Amino acid sequence: MKFRSKQIHAGVVPDKTTGAILTPIYQSTTFVQDSVDSYLAKGYSYSRSGNPTVKALENKLAELEGGADATCYGTGMSAVHCTMLAFLSAGDHAIISDVAYGGTYRLCTKVLNRMGIEFSFADTSNPDDVKSHVKENTKLFLTETPANPTMKISDISAISEIAKSANAVHVVDNTLITPCFQRAIELGADLSLHSTTKYFDGHNATVGGVVVAKTKELDEKLRFIQNSTGSIMSPMVAWLTLQGCKTLSVRMEAQSANAMAIANFLENHPKVKQVAYPGLESFSQHELAKSQSTGFGAMLWFEVEGGLEAGKRLMDSIELWTLAENLGSVESLITHPVTMTHADVDEAERQRVGIIDGLVRLSVGLEDGQDLIDALSKALDNA
């Protein structure tokens, strides 16, 4: 099946008992066994260890990413945490994108580092810089591409080769562009990670995460940690995400078209100092983005002339766009990363990697594109 068909049909079948076309919500703590001798004959015992609704979503997401299997978690950060627990121990070293979600940075620098795990933050857009951080005890690479919020692009194939040479696993955070446009595993990654909260859900209704593994062996390591830490996604969230998946490509294509139009508008506006969107030819990594993805996504950022104060006036006064954390939803959101999503990142580190004080992040939704542009134009006039 092609991608659009998989979105709807992969991983799910009509209910055998009733014929229901939608996967039932198996809201059950435990599962009755036929006998002691046939324990787990039906595959399930307790919903912390596995649930049929969650498994249907795991099967679907594995097929969409081209992996062997997948594990779903209560949040995207739980997916990141469990991945690190599965492949890192005290004394190990990991290389992380220097531009990464603020929660990932916080987990590495304020939690896992206390457990004897060492982290280096490398410019993953530069394979040579990644190589320079490799140590004998390097066990994991985490590449976020496109990166949140700067949209920096990293060469997945090149970093996968470096990780392979180091006998380490390469994890790609594929949240911002999804397998609709970018197949991280096909490009060489061992694991493709997502906050399902974003585009897979698409409707600001749930929080969740997933890690898709290239091999069953990798998946088994993740599944052990998922069960041991009790981090599995809930059946209701899995069911809602199953429905969101069905329209992923339709939403991504429309939202990306809106983003392209908005990026062109901002690039030509006299009050905009700079704009970053991988679909623009002026974007420094435009060619790399084209080479490893079939679309550019619905995320971009810009800086208003007048700096931070002008940006604040714009965000506080804009209509139609919603000032809120999150991304990937049908509603268009506007965010100030320095005070919101990346507030936990050290100020010097933020400045070093390009998360400037005046950066305004846009998550473009499904509203009429001209309405979104008109709202931005009015807010810019008042900024």
Image: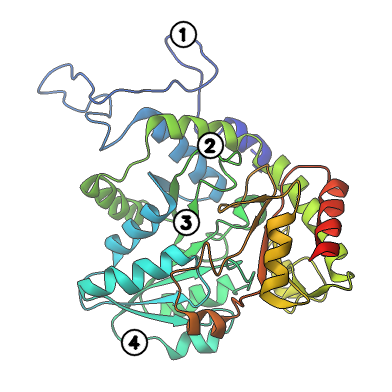
Q: Nearer the viewer, residue 264 or 169?
A: 264
Q: Position of residue 201 (x, y in %)?
A: 56, 40
Sequence-earlier tag: 1 or 3: 1
Closest to the camera, between mark 1 and mark 3, is 3
Q: Nearer the viewer, residue 174 or 274?
A: 274
Q: Position of residue 120 (x, y in %)?
A: 39, 82
Q: For the point 64% across and 69% down, which residue is it?
A: 151
Whole-Å distance between the Cαs marked 4 and 1?
Answer: 56 Å
Q: Position of residue 279 (x, y in %)?
A: 78, 65
Residue that mark 2 sits on: 205
Q: Amino acid at mark 1?
A: Thr
Which numbered marker is on residue 135? 4
233 relative position to 306: left or right: left
Whole-Å distance between the Cαs marked 2 and 4?
Answer: 41 Å
Residue that mark 3 sits on: 193
Closest to the camera, between mark 2 and mark 1, is 2
Q: Amino acid at mark 3?
A: Leu
Q: Amino acid at mark 2?
A: Ala
Residue that mark 1 sits on: 18
Q: Is residue 282 visible?
A: yes
Give the farthest residue toward the top.
18
Neighbours of disc 1 within 10 Å: few (<14), some (14-19), many (20+): few
Compared with residue 22, is residue 142 higher up or lower down, i.e. above or below? below
Compared with residue 70, is residue 157 higher up or lower down, i.e. above or below? below
Q: Nearer the viewer, residue 142 or 354?
A: 354
Which numbered marker is on residue 320? none
311 relative position to 165: left or right: right
Q: For the point 44% across and 78% down, which residue is it?
A: 346
